[in-house]
Amino acid sequence: MAIISKETLPPFGHAVAGSAGAMFALSLVYPLDIIKTRIQVQAKHEGLDDKEQEHYTSALDGITQIMQKEGLAGLYAGLGSSLIGTASTNFTYFYCYSLVRDLYNKNYNPGGGTLSAALELLLGAAAGAMTTLVTTPIAVLTTRQQTLPSDERQGVFATCATILSEEGIAGLWKGIRPSLILCVNPAITYGSFEKIKQFVLDVLQRKMTPATAFLVGAISKTLATVVTYPYIMAKVRLQWKPSKEIQDKVEPYKGAGDVLARVLKSDGFFGWYKGMSTQIFKAVLSQALLFMMKDVFTNYTVMAYVLLLKLARRKLAA
């Protein structure tokens, strides 16, 4: 029987560990996720006065306004679908990433040499594209639940049914094009993480402790977020639906290019980066926690595999 370790853990095991770590991280930073999503959809729409448009001057202001209007529950609106989305996204990504990496190493890198940065990005992008095609509907559901007023907010299945009845099946894949472009985000994140980790291990001669993994993860995610933020904002606006109160006064977006053009016209270049500080803080904290906790969850997953294999051997022996 093969010995199970972090190095020999199959893709399914890495996917389980990655999903568990991501859900743990999201649960800790979820209020920031709500705030960054609402800031991203706030825009200057013609025909609407300031009273009709929710506006947050900062993350703290957003938290204060939500607490006043919706209470503590408002900061966790859509948490269920978000956790499902995070679990499915990270499970699919880690599974695909581990799978394509293992396949490449098996066929083209049997010696286990260090992969180039370009190749890490390519493998990450391939895994990200597979993940996006599967998980975009959950992202749409989460955005709707996070941004609709509390009196219009529905459960996961009711939200899905409403989208299907009003927009058809295509409504569940709104924002798919910028989402596919954003596959470079995890590719940059994980590619950068692997390279920075290698630098820490080989050049700095430091061990990858949880604290070091946290720092390396934070640097990696910051880089990816800065590079891709305009498309992150465009994707969220495409998946957003105005409240019934202003729906007839807001012109729907036609695509990512339309979002970027209209934001540039109304808010200038820096409008493309509206809410980025909250996005970076949330993304960096969440990603760093994920990288830090994935090692912990990977250890538990290895232990679970070993236990299951021992139980299976005893059953066969009996």
Image: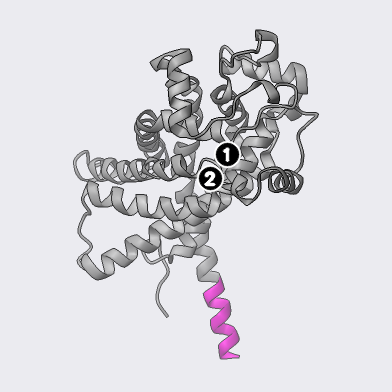
Magenta region, residue range: 308-318
Residue matched to label 2: 22
- Residue at (44% x, 15% y) in the render: 265
In the rendered view, would you say 167 is above or below 224? Answer: below
Residue matched to label 1: 26
Q: Is residue 250 found left or right of 130 in the rendered image? A: right
| Residue 313: quadrant of the picture | bottom right
- Residue at (42% x, 14% y) in the render: 268
- Residue at (66% x, 15% y) in the render: 53
Give the overall secondary structure of the magenta segment.
Answer: helix
**Kind of residue at badge 2:** Ala
Front residue (pair 254, 154): 254
Front residue (pair 245, 68): 245
Task: State how far apart marks 2 and 1 are (Cα).
Answer: 6 Å
**Kind of residue at badge 1:** Leu
Front residue (pair 257, 180): 257
Q: Position of residue 188 (x, y in %)?
A: 33, 41
Q: Are marks 2 and 1 in contact (CB under 8 Å)?
A: yes
- Residue at (48% x, 31% y) in the render: 234
In the rendered view, would you say 181 is above or below 277? Answer: below
Q: Is residue 78 found left or right of 186 in the rendered image? A: right
Q: Looking at this view, name the residue that lies furthest to the bottom.
A: 318
